Amino acid sequence: MRESKRRKRVIITGANGFIGSNLTKYLSRDPSLEVFAMVRPDAPVNFLKDFQFKDDSNEKWFELVEGNLLEEDSLVEAFEDKDIVIHLAGFVSDWGDKKRFFQINVEGTKKVLRAARIVKASRVLYLSSLAVHGFGGHSYANEEAPFAKKNYAYGETKKIGEELVREWITNNPDADGAIIRPGFIIYGRYDKNSFILALDVISSGKFAFINRGKRLVSYVYVDNLCYGINQLIQAPEVSGVYNILDGNMTWREWVSKWEQAVGRKVTTVSVPYAFLVPITAAMVGFYKLLRIKKSPPLNFYRINVMRKDLAFVNTRITTEVGYTPPTELDDGILQTLEYYYDSKKGKER
């Protein structure tokens, strides 16, 4: 009788986040994988437990494990006997203390990579961001597009994270790794702080564009992102950077798609970028002067996202592992809206 093939043991950091929770659910349904969802000791996990068990039984789809991104020993313990480390955890924000960005996104990544080396993980997949390229304008740029010379704290720390991963791959000849850059807009279930905030505005019947909303932006449905990540798990070998996205469209086209799905006319206004600069500068200066931790209504990250084209292509993952988005845009929108309306009724999380 043929011996069954051993399942790959995969651990996901930041498993209770937007992408992490979707990826945990997605990968745990793959019979070739044994999935471990790593969360902080004090992290809320009730919603993860909602889909952890099979058919109201005691059998689990995945295991929950605790680990502290800033404590190497706890990471080593969490990573022990795992084949693949998927590092999603990080400080993702358009506003915040620069020290915190570096502490979590740089120092935390260093500790993750050291722990992965100690336990001899065979592969590391690192979730980066297209923000490493900055907002200077990109017209269907591929994975070789240069880093921004000057960037915001988030983009700068993700760039450093990429450099650390490349160094790790070079210094670990028996292992491999890849850097993942998703589309700028990531949408889907379990979103609390990303595109869902813009969806609140669209649902209210109002939306403001910068420069008439004519600039391009890349997007990806979260299930398609998870599908692409699983392709990188299953690939015999991986290396370098992989953009994962579904396409590009103008901001005005993007809002129009959601307007049609919501079934409500959205009143739009267009504000010139030059008009917003002094207003944003005043807001940012005021918040910094008073040391207010939350972001002002406008900051330079937010107004620059719509200023120039942010269009990219995913050439490498398409040609090397055959990535094709399994969920079409219209279906992704409908599934997202179903979650959105349920969450408003208190049925989700």
Image (cartoon, helix red, strand yellow):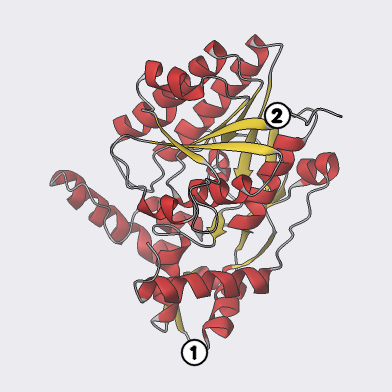
The residue that label 2 is drawn on is: 240
Residue at image point 59% right, 56% down: 222
The residue that label 1 is drawn on is: 265
Point out residue 339 in the picture as x, y percentages from the top left corner. 48, 70
Residue at image point 61% right, 36% down: 34
Image quarter (top left, top right, bottom left or bottom right) of the N terminus: top right
Residue at image point 53% right, 46% down: 59
Point out residue 299 in the picture as x, y percentages from the top left corner. 34, 54
Side (left or right) of 9 relative to 336: right
Among numbered discs 2 and 1, the one appearing first in the sequence = 2
Residue 147 shows up from this direction: yes
SS at mark 2?
loop
Instruction: Give amino acid for label 2.
Output: Gly
Badge 2, how many Cα within 10 Å: few under 14, some, many 20+? some
Instruction: Give amino acid for label 1.
Output: Lys
Side (left or right) of 139 relative to 112: right
Q: How many marks?
A: 2
| Disc 2 from disc 1: Cα separation | 44 Å
SS at mark 1?
loop
Point out residue 275 in the picture as x, y percentages from the top left corner. 37, 66
Residue 111 shows up from this direction: no
Image quarter for residue 240?
top right
Q: Nearer the viewer, residue 205 or 172?
A: 172
Image quarter (top left, top right, bottom left or bottom right) of the C terminus: bottom left
Q: Nearer the viewer, residue 24 or 290?
A: 24
Image quarter for residue 199?
bottom left
